[in-house]
Amino acid sequence: MSLFNNGGLRKLIGRAALLSFVLATPSLSQAQTQTSLDEMLKPYLEQYRLPAVAAAVVKDGKVISVGAVGERKFGSGIPVTVNDRFHIGSDTKAFTATLAAMLVDRGQMQWTTTIGEVFPELALNMDSGFRSITISQLLSHTSGIPADNAEFIELLAKSTFEEGNLDDLRYWLLQQWMTKPLQAAPGQRFAYSNMGYTMAGAMIERVAKKSWDELIREWIFDPLELKTAGLGSQASPGRIDAALGHGILDDGNIKAFMAGPGDDNPQIIGPAGMAHMSVLDFARWAGWNAGQGKHAPALLKPETLKLLHTAVVDMPSARNPAPGTPSSGKYALGWVIATTDWSPQPLVFHGGSNQKNLAHIWFSPEKDFAMVVVTNISSAKANDALFDIAGKLYKQFSP
């Protein structure tokens, strides 16, 4: 909904993509030895009004093709590179699901662990339905918590006046929401909820005894050597040192957003969509998932990783969803299972947007093949462009 619709999937008819990826993040010099996608990507800049666009293809744990074209800031003349950071929005949700899975593999939590069990000091004051929500229901958007609404946005605004670290603020947010009745009984129906993923982050923080922001770096970014990965604004304040996010003004002009309060969502909802990284690091993440345990590091048991990619619930079709927001398919745990007319098998997918950037990730565990496509603007045209690029890449590179 408006600023907070980060993640998902556009109606997948006549489009899709998926590729497989590499084990070790290539350096710039390594990337230059791969097949370049630059010439294929260039026409999309003018045709779809994109400041920049980048893509990478991964097969059997290796990046086989990569490209990045356009500008960090529209009209600046500063070119993007394959090492530039792009915001990935709700594609962050799969990282949050992975953190939960790591706790399950370590025996610190179960998929059936409830909010009430993790926060016993609050349980008596919780709505009875809210108390019974499990971590797997939060991660599959079947918790009964409604899709983002005005109450959620109002609480995010209030959170900026609260004192404490981000884990303190997520605990505060849980306290503010825990007495509200659910929209549906837990496990009954799908509703795409950034609040739900923020609650999942709070559960992970309590069980692991560390903030989600620390955990994603220490448990995932560092072991996978995602050296460009970070949280929040992809650029440094006052600098054009990354692919800045862009929006389209009422008069149709494109506006770049420098790092600051207006270029990203509130940090409190990090577990729902705050990561950024280069197209190469994003591809490494995609390829690691596509391998389902074939590629190091062994962060999860292969069967646990496969479970994350297994459909849980059908998503009702949505008309004209905001770019980066699911519209159809099946939802797994941080991932969408998407059927397309150019792939003989369903593909694992997710999309992400903070309304100023857009990122799509696709992979096929059966083929150990993955691909990622990113741009630094969010619009219906940008969404169309990423789906079109994905389809072309799949047809050209899929084994």
Image (tube, rainbow, N blue to C red):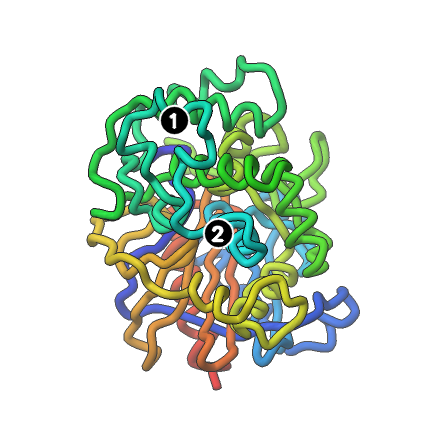
Report if residue 307 is visible in the image: yes
In depth, the one of 237 and 101 nearer the eye is 101
Q: Which of 305 and 191 is in front in this view?
A: 305
Residue 303 x, y percent position in the rendering: 48, 70
User: Dot 2, crowdedness within 10 Å: few (<14), some or many (≥20)?
Assistant: many
Q: Is residue 128 left or right of residue 287?
A: left
Image location (x, y in percent) of residue 240: 69, 40
Q: Where, by quadrant of the figure, is residue 260 drawn?
A: top right
Q: Residue 64 placed where, x, y %?
A: 62, 78
Q: What residue type is labelled 2?
A: Ala
Check disc 1: other Cα within 10 Å, few if <14, some if 14-19, many if 20+. Answer: some
Instruction: Indicate which disc residue 97 carries.
Output: 2
Earlier residue among tags 2 and 1: 2
Q: Which of the 4 image quadrants contains residue 244?
A: top right
- Residue 395's x, y, as percent? 42, 80
Q: Which residue lies furthest to the right in this view?
A: 29
Q: Which amino acid does label 1 sit on?
A: Ala
User: Which of the numbered marks, if any, corresponds to residue 336?
Assistant: none
| Image: 279 above or below 88 | below
| Residue 324 appears anywhere in the view | no
Work out whether 360 lies above or below 15. above
Residue for point 49% across, 34% down: 269
When the figure is inspected, residue 73 is found, relative to residue 342, above or below; the finding is above
Q: Nearer the viewer, residue 135 or 371?
A: 135
Q: In which quarter of the image is residue 29?
A: bottom right
* Callout 1 secondary element: helix
User: Disc 1 designates what residue?
Assistant: 123
Which residue: 71% across, 70% down?
A: 31
